[in-house]
Amino acid sequence: MAEQNRLGLEKRAYGGSPSTLCTGCGHDLISNHVISACYNADIPPHRVAKMSGIGCSSKIPAYFMSGSFAFNSMHGRMAPIATGAGVVQPSLRYLGVSGDGDTASIGLGGFIHLLRRNLPICYIIADNGVYGLTKGQFSATAEASSVLRTGEHNLFESLDICALSVEAGASFVARAFAGDAKQMVPMIQAGLFHQGTAVIDVISPCITFNNHDGSTKSYSYVKEHDVVLQELGLILEGTTHHIDYPEGSTERVDLLDGRTLTLRKLDSRAHNVRDREAALRLLHESQEAGELLTGLIYVNEKKPTLQQKLALSDRPLANLTEVELRPPREQMKKLLAQFR
Ligand SMILES: Cc1ncc(C[n+]2csc(CCOP(=O)(O)OP(=O)(O)O)c2C)c(N)n1
Ligand code: SF4
Ligand SMILES: [Mg+2]
């Protein structure tokens, strides 16, 4: 019999439709990592809502967990639609997949406000530096030094999604490489169990339009420049875990439902993941040095979520009765008095 997780589900219960992306596209690796992350962390597929926008990247949710809720929205509109869904149905676990074009160009306004509000969602950006679906134009995350396959040079400075997210008040900011399963699986799990918006900027090479010399988002460029900050691990609720790392080299991040993310520092810089200023400095310095830094860059476990700020019920709006929804008589009187 095939192996099962603690819910009694086989891994194939976490699969989706066959991919229609180009063979070798980094986005297909992301789908595989999501499947492993959710299967290993015993997440019931029917309690997940998959959100996306438009782009090759926004097709990713079709390739995992067919049994989940899903909303494939308009280009750049994943953030506001997820916010609406999260407010009326807070009991689902939200998993959003967007592209660098979808998030950092047309959807930038909505993205920034999602971060300010801290909606609980694992927000993956499949970042390939181009608009893959519309045949490979530069996106806003392409480095100024980038050259297209056609020889066209990028005219503009790049926008760093991680630095922007830290600046905008995101409570979890990470960067990863789609080709690194060891890093991606616990990172997605942590993003799903983080209490707030978890931004994961995943460098995901576009094999067709941006995998040549001159690209800073090709498989070979990432492998040469990747500087991994930490080795990540996830401790599940109810499991005992022995950490045999040397004293002081490990940090823990508290997540929902008794889960913990462990970070074993690999980089010689003693980066404190809870220091916002240091996170920005680190990103700026590493960019200057030509490094591609991956790992957990910033976390704030204490930032209240949108639901907490608005004191919303954790039950879906549709399940609340008329009596529960009606304001109390005294409140109603006070409200009406304001209009007299
Ligand atoms: C309102 C609107 N404007 C433009 C487009 C055309 N369009 C479709 S996908 C896309 C960019 C996709 O790039 P990205 O989000 O980086 O995804 P990728 O295909 O690279 O994974 C654009 C401009 C559209 N569908 N809708
Ligand atoms: S065009 Fe690029 S991003 Fe789109 S499926 Fe092909 S390789 Fe992937
Ligand atoms: Mg793209």
Image: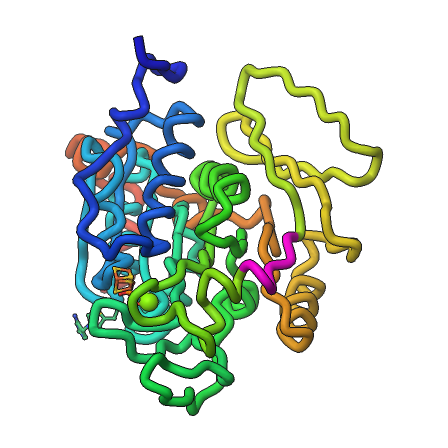
Pick the quarter of the image with the N terminus.
top left
Seen at 48% across and 67% down, the residue is 161
What colouring method underlies this structural image? rainbow
For the view shown, which residue lies furthest in the right direction? 247
**Residue in front for this viewpoint, 277 or 303:** 277
Residue 9: name its quadrant. top left
**Total tally of numbered discs in the picture:** 0
Can residue 108 be seen at all in this image of the molecule? no
Q: Is residue 111 left or right of residue 261?
A: left
**Residue 149: x %, y % from top left:** 35, 79
For the view shown, which residue lies furthest in the top direction? 1
Q: Report the magenta residues as a range.
A: 223-228
- Image quarter for ligand 1 equals bottom left
Seen at 39% across and 32% down, the residue is 36
**Residue 328: x %, y % from top left:** 27, 38
**Residue in front for this viewpoint, 164 or 295:** 295
Q: In the rendered structure, does residue 224 fall within the stretch colored magenta?
A: yes
Q: In the rendered structure, does residue 308 fall within the stretch colored magenta?
A: no
Seen at 40% across and 77% down, the residue is 140
Pick the quarter of the image with the C terminus.
bottom left
Residue 43: name its quadrant. top left
Q: Is residue 59 left or right of residue 101?
A: left
**Residue 111: x %, y % from top left:** 37, 65
**Residue 21: x %, y % from top left:** 22, 54
**Residue in front for this viewpoint, 191 or 157:** 157
Seen at 59% across and 64% down, the residue is 292
Location of residue 298 with respect to 320 vertically, above or below: below
Can residue 138 be seen at all in this image of the molecule? yes
